[in-house]
Image (cartoon, rainbow, N blue to C red):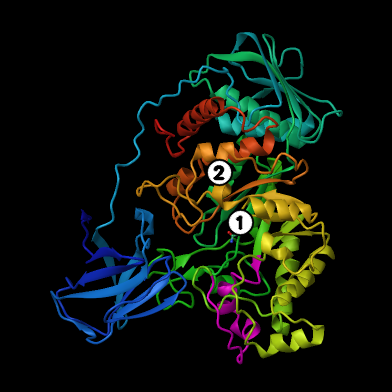
């Protein structure tokens, strides 16, 4: 048993497996010094479980409420055992354990601490000296440039930091200064400037040339974005020498392989501050990722202020015991959450634009909608709907109803505001994971099906998405969606689609003519655990994936030359703070960056690993906590 000390009510967990099933015994001790009546144990568990012996269970999503089936009193000093049952591999790693535990009785809540459990814990990953010894370039740039020639010699680190820059290069020079923590003095005299930024209109939008020679550092591009990309390379080279003594002389000619290189951050399951997002944008720019996919709404919360519906954020952005939305994913009994107002969105969008990053907001419909439905029940619920379904995340009331006029009013108002505050070309409308059985018991949906001649309730999804796509098109915006968006053939064929379930989906969507963003869970989901070590945090429904797995699997088969791009997705079920975010993000996101930009990705693991190590050192000097690479990684 692992022992954790605490002052809260102690809870012990014992998992036993027999054949294909397991039993989870939860023993709660009343150390309050008084008896409690009509009590209930609350905990969050992302597992399919049923009530075991002498236990009553109810659940909303990950939030479970357990009560003894008979005695409702727990005298002072007494213990009670509650039981759950599930499949044999119910809990495999520490991050599978229940979280957000508390007891409620009357108006009270009391924290509960898991004080012991019997999960096997292998030795933690150690950061021993590894077997790889990188003897490559003095400029371990990541992603690898298209063409880099290392010349002989070095030049001194720019001491006086003088720059001569065309207007288009100024945001990139500003960013370099901020990231280096040093100022550059403008120089009128090009010949005397240590950094010279100049235009060459023959270069592509994100292409650049960087020349570090004995006299000068010269950066040439045709657009503001091209200067950003070149500045990222220069920053990596500058930061590779923490002593700030010399720079290697070299020439780089660089351009991206894919136009779309994305990173998704789920801000619905747990709220991440604007400061975290701005810092993340800096890191995206450092590795030349150019689309920030901002997952703003889900079952567990709605995070975007919509002026037409203040309820969405007054109610839908908060969880807690006795709040409209119950605790989820470890958030506990107190009111917990947050949202982004228009000013926050403006800061993110403006900062991203300066870095050449497009922000794609995601309003996930028609599934994953519990938070908005609970916030606006009069508009979005149908009294006579007796559809029965359970979503993958255990919600049974999380799907917008395409038969209700309120749904269309809601979407029109929400999308109108979203289009107003996000200037980029894309709006992501989700469309993933609508559970089987949604709408089957809805009189309004049945009526719509009759009107339209639909035979399968699933056609209602395409009906709603088609309507939403038209709303976007009228505002000059393009819809983008997860792969289920194409299910019943109602979307326009140029809709970009994020293929997330696997290579089969990547290939099929591509052969159907859709522009495909490749992001299969098995090598692009940053929430997936690194390995089978039970100490390694993460989900494992799609297996586990270490850096080498990410690096060695191409996003598209070689015969597909025209994929739209790649994306890494950081779902936040398990991410409640910055350290966890950084641990899951790095180093694996670097493999996505390499595949997205470099035309030579995937061919040289030792070289890539060496460049990753150099980048991890630089990141650590910035105060970031990546997952360390161990000797066997
Ligand atoms: C997804 O992982 N549901 C897109």
The image position of residue 34, as x and y in percent, is 16, 78
| Residue underneath mark 1 | 501
Query: Considering only order in the chain, which callout, 2 or 1, is on the residue closer to the N terminus?
Result: 2
Residue 368 included in the magenta stretch of the image: yes
The residue mark sitting in front, 1 or 2, is 1
The image position of residue 415, as x and y in percent, is 73, 67
Packing grade of label 1 (10 A; few <14, some 14-19, many >=20) is some
Residue 382 included in the magenta stretch of the image: yes
| Residue underneath mark 2 | 279
Q: Is residue 355 above or below residue 615?
A: below
Give the residue drawn at x 46%, y 30%. Answer: 621
613 left or right of 161 in image: left
Give the residue drawn at x 74%, y 89%. Answer: 447
Query: Which residue extends farthest right?
Result: 202
The stretch of residues the image draws in magenta is: 364-391
In terms of image quadrants, where is residue 282?
Answer: top right
Q: Quadrant of the C terminus?
A: top left
The image position of residue 597, as x and y in percent, is 68, 35
The image position of residue 267, as x and y in percent, is 55, 58
190 left or right of 335 in image: right
In terms of image quadrants, where is residue 360?
Answer: bottom right
């Amino acid at each position: 048993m692992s022992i954790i000390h605490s002052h809260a009510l102690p809870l012990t967990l014992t998992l036993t497996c027999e054949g294909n099933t397991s039993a989870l015994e939860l023993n709660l001790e009343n150390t309050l010094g008084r008896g409690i009546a009509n009590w209930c144990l609350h905990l969050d568990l992302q597992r399919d479980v049923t009530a075991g012996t002498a236990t009553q269970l109810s659940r909303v999503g990950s939030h479970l409420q357990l009560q003894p089936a008979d005695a409702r009193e727990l005298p002072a000093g007494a213990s009670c055992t509650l039981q759950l049952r599930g499949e044999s591999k119910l809990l495999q790693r520490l991050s599978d354990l229940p979280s957000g535990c508390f007891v409620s009785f009357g108006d009270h809540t009391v924290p509960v601490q898991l004080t012991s459990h019997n999960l096997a814990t292998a030795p933690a990953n150690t950061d021993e000296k590894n077997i790889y010894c990188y003897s490559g370039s003095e400029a371990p740039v990541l992603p690898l440039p298209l063409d880099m020639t290392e010349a002989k010699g070095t030049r001194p680190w720019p001491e006086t930091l003088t720059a001569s820059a065309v207007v288009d290069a100024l945001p990139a020079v500003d960013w370099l200064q901020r990231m280096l923590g040093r100022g550059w003095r403008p120089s009128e005299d090009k010949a005397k400037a240590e950094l010279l930024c100049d235009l060459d209109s023959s270069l592509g939008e994100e292409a650049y040339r960087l020349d570090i020679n004995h006299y000068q550092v010269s950066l040439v591009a045709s657009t503001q974005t091209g200067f950003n990309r070149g500045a990222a390379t220069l920053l990596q080279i500058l930061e590779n020498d923490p002593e700030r003594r010399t720079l290697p002389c070299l020439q780089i000619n660089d351009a991206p392989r894919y136009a779309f290189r994305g990173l998704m951050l789920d801000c619905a399951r747990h709220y991440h501050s604007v400061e975290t997002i701005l810092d993340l944008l800096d890191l995206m720019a450092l590795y030349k990722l150019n689309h920030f996919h901002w997952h703003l709404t889900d079952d567990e919360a709605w995070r975007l202020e919509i002026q037409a519906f203040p309820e969405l954020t007054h109610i839908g952005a908060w969880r807690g015991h006795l709040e409209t939305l119950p605790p989820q994913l470890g958030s506990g009994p107190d009111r917990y959450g947050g949202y982004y107002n228009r000013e926050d969105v403006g800061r993110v969008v403006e900062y991203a634009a300066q870095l050449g990053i497009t922000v794609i907001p995601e309003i996930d419909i028609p599934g994953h909608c519990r938070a908005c439905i609970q916030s606006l029940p009069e508009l979005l619920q149908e009294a006579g709907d007796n559809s029965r379904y359970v979503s993958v995340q255990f919600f049974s009331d999380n799907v917008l109803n395409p038969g209700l006029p309120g749904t269309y009013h809601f979407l029109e108002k929400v999308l109108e505001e979203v289009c107003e505050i996000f200037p980029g070309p894309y709006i992501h409308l989700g469309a993933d994971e609508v559970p089987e059985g949604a709408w089957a018991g809805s009189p309004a949906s049945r009526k719509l099906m009759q009107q339209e001649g639909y035979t399968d309730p699933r056609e209602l999804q395409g009906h709603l998405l088609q309507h939403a796509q038209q709303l976007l098109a009228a505002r000059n915006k393009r819809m983008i969606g997860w792969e289920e968006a194409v299910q019943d053939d109602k979307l326009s064929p140029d809709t970009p689609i994020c293929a997330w379930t696997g290579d089969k989906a990547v290939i099929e969507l591509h052969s159907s003519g859709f522009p495909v963003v490749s992001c299969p869970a098995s090598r692009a989901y940053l929430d997936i655990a690194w390995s089978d070590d039970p100490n390694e945090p993460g989900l494992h429904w799609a297996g586990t994936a270490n850096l080498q797995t990410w690096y060695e699997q191409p996003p598209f088969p070689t015969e597909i030359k025209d994929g739209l791009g790649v994306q890494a997705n950081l779902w936040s079920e398990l991410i409640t703070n910055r350290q966890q975010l950084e641990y899951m993000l790095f180093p694996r996101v670097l493999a996505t960056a390499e595949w997205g930009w470099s035309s030579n990705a995937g061919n040289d693991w030792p070289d890539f690993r060496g460049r990753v190590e150099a980048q991890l050192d630089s990141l650590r000097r910035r105060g970031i906590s990546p997952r360390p690479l161990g000797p066997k990684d």
